[in-house]
Amino acid sequence: MDTFLGFPKDTTIIVTGAASGIGEALAKLAARQGLAVAAWDLTEDGARATAEAIAGEGGTARAYGLDVSDRSQVEAAMAQTCADLGPVHCLAAVAGPPSFKIADFDEGLSQSISCMRMPTEAWIASGPAGVASAVYLSSVQGPRYGAGVQWYSVAKSAIDGYMRSVAGMRQGGLRANAVLPDWIVTPRTSEFVEATGGTEWDVNPMGRVGLPEDVANAAMFLLSPAAAYLNGLSIEVDGGARLRSLAWMRMAEASGSAA
Ligand SMILES: NC(=O)c1ccc[n+]([C@@H]2O[C@H](COP(=O)([O-])OP(=O)(O)OC[C@H]3O[C@@H](n4cnc5c(N)ncnc54)[C@H](O)[C@@H]3O)[C@@H](O)[C@H]2O)c1
């Protein structure tokens, strides 16, 4: 059998935010690639539901309820995860606060960074070996857009910088990369996605809005041994949304030169 991604047997991953949306899709995908999954989430019931779904398909997963921005909770969960599943080879730092839930700039920024930094520091302290790769959930809101919630743009840019600092940390050691989605339909965004009535997604070269699985697939590849020479990259997962706009398309149609 061709095992292109190349994860060794007994590889273990922590997925934060595993109860919902992108984290849930990534946790389930990782289990289907044979990885043992530690599903970390603020919502313990949700993390348990993900772990049970994985077990139902014959995979290995454990659920942990914690706030991943809290150092002491993260250290306790890391110790428990290692006791339950053994050494942790991969980290997927997906969880972060929703942009529309926090009004205060400093609070939003600090929570976003802590959600990435606390699990990373605990993971590195545990001495990741083998695959030793991490992936971070940033957003095109960091490098691309100006409109939107200000702290969220700043935080997502900062997450890219944080990722690069991890990627350059240990020669021959761990790798780190980031995925930067545009709009993805998850429980967090579905209300806003539906409110557009679909017009925006028709403009996307793929003709549709993104799905959690689109992001999970990219993240899984970056984590895997197949991406062994990819390090410190920020990969946009947007179907090419940046390539087209309604205004440019209307102008091309009006000029008679639309492709
Ligand atoms: N959905 C999108 O369009 C989109 C686009 C770009 C980036 N992102 C990023 O992807 C990540 C996941 O987004 P989603 O849309 O899947 O969201 P979601 O709300 O569906 O899932 C997020 C999960 O993270 C958990 N979580 C949040 N804060 C936590 C904390 N402090 N500790 C532990 N768990 C916590 C939540 O309980 C939830 O289960 C976020 O970092 C988000 O900024 C999402």
Image (spheres, rainbow, N blue to C red):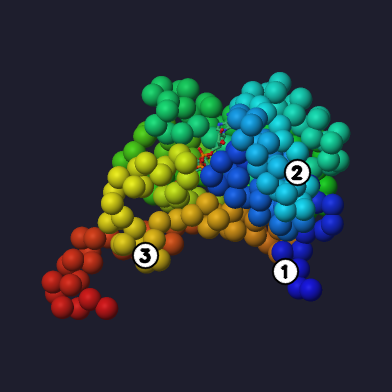
**Can you give x and y, in whole percent of width and height, for residue 52 in the image?**
71, 42
Mark nearest the camera among 3 and 1 is 3
Q: Residues within 10 Å of mark 3 (few under 14, many from 20)?
A: some
Quarter occupied by residue 85 = top right
Q: Residue at x 48, y 29 (%)?
A: 109
Name above or below for residue 71 compared with residue 206.
above
Mark nearest the camera among 1 and 2 is 2
- Earlier sequence position, callout 3 versus callout 1: 1
Q: Amino acid at mark 2?
A: Ala
The residue that mark 2 highlights is: 61
Name above or below for residue 57 compared with residue 191.
below
Name above or below for residue 129 compared with residue 99.
below
The residue that mark 3 highlights is: 207
Q: CA distance from mark 3 to mark 2?
A: 35 Å
Q: Is residue 8 visible?
A: yes
Q: Is residue 233 visible?
A: no
Q: Residues within 10 Å of mark 2 (few under 14, many from 20)?
A: many
Q: Amino acid at mark 1?
A: Phe
**Can you give x and y, in whole percent of width and height, for residue 198 in the image?**
31, 55
**Can you give x and y, in whole percent of width and height, for residue 96 in the image?**
54, 35
Q: How many marks?
A: 3
Q: Residue at x 44, y 62 (%)?
A: 239
Q: Amino acid at mark 3?
A: Gly
Mark 1 C-beta closer than 8 Å to ligand 1 = no
Q: Quadrant of the C terminus?
A: bottom left
The residue that mark 1 highlights is: 4
Mark nearest the camera among 3 and 2 is 2
Mark on residue 24? none
Q: Residue at x 52, y 52 (%)?
A: 212
Name above or below for residue 48 compared with residue 135.
above
